Amino acid sequence: MSKSSNNRYNGDDIWKNNTEKINSELFTLTYGSIVSQLCRDFNHNYHEVNNQLDKMGYNIGLRLIEEFLAKTGVGRCSTFKETVEVISKLGFKIFLNITPQIENWSSDNKSCSLILPDPNPLTEFVELPNLKDAEILKELWYSQILCGVLRGALQMVQLDVDVNFVKDTLRGDDKTEIRLKLNKFLKDEVPAGED
Amino acid sequence: MTQDILDSQTYVSSSSLYYLLQELVPTSIRVSHKLLDSSPSTSTSTAASTASTTTKITSTNTSSLFTDKDEPTTLDHQLSSIPKDLPGTVHVLDSSLLNNDEVTLRIESYGYNLGIKLAEILLYKSNNNGTKIVDILDIMKFVCRDVWKCLYNKQMDNLRTNHRGTFVLVDSNYKLISNLNSAKGINDTLSKSKVYLWLPCGIIRGILSNFGIESNVTAEITQFPAVTFNIHTSINN
């Protein structure tokens, strides 16, 4: 346990010394092409786009957690509060090189908000074409993939958590906010569909 | 040449990009599956609904097939109606759509769009690099060095040409498939990896297209995970 708490905040070290990096513009571009093509494919049904991004993210999360645990060597968190700290200071740090602010804890310490810096690596240079299509501002969660990633990754460490966007600066909000809500700790068991 | 050609202000982990790129193939299959699934039912839906509605026809018709709300993915819900397509499994690759044109074209066009934009930022930022791009061979070198370096942190391993517009590029360890491994053996790995190659083919075609060169790019796995890209252009050099 003591080892894990020493490791807890060395996201900077891991980022500097143990992470192969690529330029974030390339990442931004790639993600942007995916979102825009999904919008075209689904004929601008943005709920469908959100869901598809969420699925991509979820699958990524299921796989990404392994790399995360291997790189950070972080141990079991004793509270959800600690988990969220780890997500922000290690998870976001070593994959996207950002450290979202944690705010707005509920009184039962089961839900809180992650405030993404603006712009974040997914949304840099991005503007939603709201003049042509007003629905986009109400329906599309451009960075929805992040919710999927978090939900998928947390699922693999036995945490059932609701993750969703509540605000996005791309929609004209004052900040980009992901809301996390812990539902329950899952028992260790073989996940469904695993043969 | 060893330093990154793009500005070095902001970086993300390269795994983030690879996770994203790797997820493109399953997503393309799911999207195609969904669209193909919905098109027959659209055509069989009552003539009244298709005929009477005017401009809103597509949105009203598809809204019954497309969802109208956000549904968070969970572990025990299928990701698509493809059999056994649950999160964390690879059953989606067993879909008969795997080598369907609808899917491969979709993957290729992801690459194509990326290639077009990528060529622009790489050229914009490489003007201090000293190398001038004069003819098509320089463009190919640009693909082999700068583009590959930027995408995969390595260069293409070999470049050959017949000087009549055909180029052969070899990457002896193509990163996006090198981790793939099917439980059913190497043949299954090979047949499923093939579809992943449409992405880099699209990227190369997009880059060339940005230079005003029409091309036809195909790829084959010569010795897993070595990949050979065959590029046919109409330009004699």
Image (cartoon, rainbow, N blue to C red):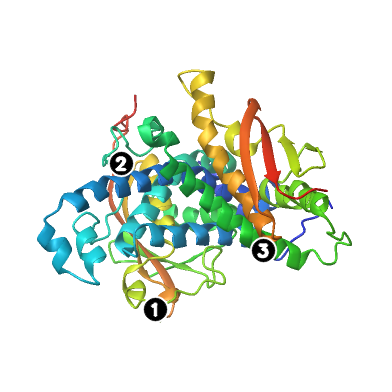
| Residue closer to the observer: A23 or B164 | B164
What type is the residue that disc 2 sits on? Leu
What type is the residue that disc 3 sits on? Thr
Q: In this figure, which residue is indicated by the disc labeled 2?
A: B75
Percent across and percent down for residue A194 are: 34, 28
Report how far apart the C-alphas of labels 2 and 1 lie in the structure.
Answer: 36 Å
What type is the residue that disc 1 sits on? Lys
In this rendering, position of residue A17 left or right of residue A68: right
In this rendering, position of residue A163 left or right of residue A37: left
Quadrant of residue A28 in the image? bottom right
Name which residue lies at 20% across and 60% down: B61
Q: In this figure, which residue is indicated by the disc labeled 3?
A: B10
Q: Chain of mark 2?
A: B
Percent across and percent down for residue A119 are: 54, 71
| Residue closer to the observer: A42 or A93 | A42
Tell me the mark number nearer the camera, choosing from 2 and 1: 1
In this rendering, position of residue B180 left or right of residue B39: right
Disc 2 and disc 3 in contact, CB within 8 angstroms: no
Provide the secondary structure element on which disc 2 rests: loop
Tell me the mark number nearer the camera, choosing from 1 and 3: 1
Q: Residues within 10 Å of mark 3 (few under 14, many from 20)?
A: some
Report how far apart the C-alphas of labels 2 and 3 lie in the structure.
Answer: 34 Å
Q: Is residue A62 above or below residue B208?
A: above
Number of callouts: 3
Percent across and percent down for residue B60 are: 20, 65
Name which residue lies at 69% across and 56% down: B213
Q: In this figure, which residue is indicated by the disc labeled 1?
A: A132
Name which residue lies at 32% across and 69% down: A139
Q: Is residue A15 above or below residue B187?
A: below
